[in-house]
Image: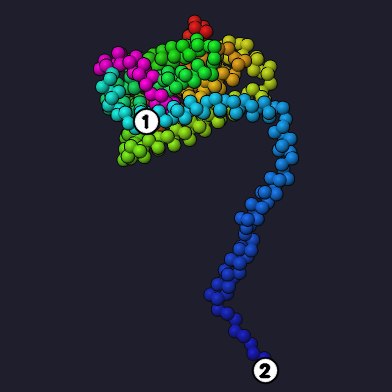
Amino acid sequence: MATVKAAPPPADRRAAADRQGADDRRGGRVDSSLVLTMLLVLAVAAQGPVRRALSAPVMQSWMTVFVAVVVQALPFLVLGVLLSALIAVFVPPSFFARALPRRPALAVPVAGAAGAVLPGCECASVPVAGALVRRGVAPAAALAFLLSAPAINPIVLTATAVAFPGEPRMVLARFVASLLVACVMGWLWQRVGRADWLRPPARPAFDGHGKGAAFWGSVRHDVMHAGGFLVVGAMAAATLKAMVPARWLATAADDPVVSILALAVLAVLLSICSEADAFVAASLSQFSLTARLTFLVVGPMIDLKLFAMQAGTFGRAFALRFAPATFALAVLVSALVGAVLL
């Protein structure tokens, strides 16, 4: 007589189904070593087309410009980052507050000229300006310092002289135009700025950290940000030189007004560190010196990353008013200074 097996309980059937589903999923899972092998095979198979693409004249020209810009700018970028971190960590913000006159109208040009003592990029000037406001410095003076420091410090001016050999007028024009824009914007803020437009920063950048940790943290931050923007700027300059039809650039460069506006907008979009922007500007040789001066004056004062940093430090209401006014004034002053000195 045949024995009839009893059906398993529902709970056991569900458990068996779950185990079977897990086994099926494990069987369908792609092994990571298989993915790596497939990628290696794909890389070997594409080696020929990639080599042919890189050997094309346009790519050779692109790589030449890209490497030249990066190699020229990198030493100044590293030196500026190190010096900026030293000053940001080891020089107390109260030093700047004591050094400025009490009257805001006099403090603005003094703070603008004091920007020459901060050998760093715009990434460093924003937190220092925030510290000045927290320590009681008049906002107009702090903003003049914020705009001038990335553009007239010794590292930036030396890099400009190296990027434009035989053109000392470019160094002088950059210094004069940048300092003038910084002072006028400071006086303008003192005249029409309102307290509720500017939100003072809540805390110092290095609270709770030792000097060594704060120094290396500042270095890492600036290297990651400034180095990344340098690479992007070099890529953009190389693309303009190698891939954009020469007649397009010639058309823009031949019109004085269009060339100035084009490089002003380009400076905002590229967001290049001020310690490296001179080499990118020098590579745009089809444009006039005045147009390239506009690129050098606008970029350290207002670009995409600076707008984000200013909004995060002083509030969006401040950035939405301060950035457009700075852009318009920087373009106008650059054109006037270029017409006189260049």
User: What amino acid is at disc 1?
Assistant: Leu
Number of numbered discs present?
A: 2
Whether residue 33 can be seen here: yes
Whether residue 144 can be seen here: no
Instruction: Provide residue 331's location: percent of width, then percent of height.
Output: 49, 15
Location of residue 290 (image quadrant): top right
Please state which of the two labelled residues, at mark 2 or mark 1, is closer to the viewer: 1
User: Which residue occupies 50% across, 16% down?
Assistant: 161
| Quadrant of the rendering where the N terminus is positioned | bottom right
User: What amino acid is at disc 2?
Assistant: Met
Range of residues picked out in magenta: 101-125
User: Which residue occupies 74% across, 35% down?
Assistant: 52
Give whichever of discs 2 and 1 has the lower sequence position: 2
Instruction: Provide residue 124's location: percent of width, then percent of height.
Output: 40, 28
* Element marked by disc 2: loop
Closer to the camera, 78 or 193? Answer: 78
Asked whether the residues under the numbered discs 2 and 1 touch, taking CB atoms below 8 Å apart as contact, a structural biologist would say no
Residue 108 lies in the magenta stretch:
yes
Which disc, if any, is residue 27?
A: none
Location of residue 27 (image quadrant): bottom right
Which disc, if any, is residue 1?
A: 2
Which residue does the numbered mark 1 point to in the structure image?
Answer: 86
Report how far apart the C-alphas of labels 2 and 1 lie in the structure. Answer: 94 Å
Instruction: Provide residue 29's location: percent of width, then percent of height.
Output: 62, 59
Residue 330 lies in the magenta stretch:
no
Q: In this view, does 112 lie to the left or right of 25?
A: left
Location of residue 164 (image quadrant): top right
User: Which residue occupies 64% across, 22% down?
Assistant: 241
User: Which residue occupies 39% across, 19% down?
Assistant: 116
Q: In this view, does 181 lie to the left or right of 100?
A: right
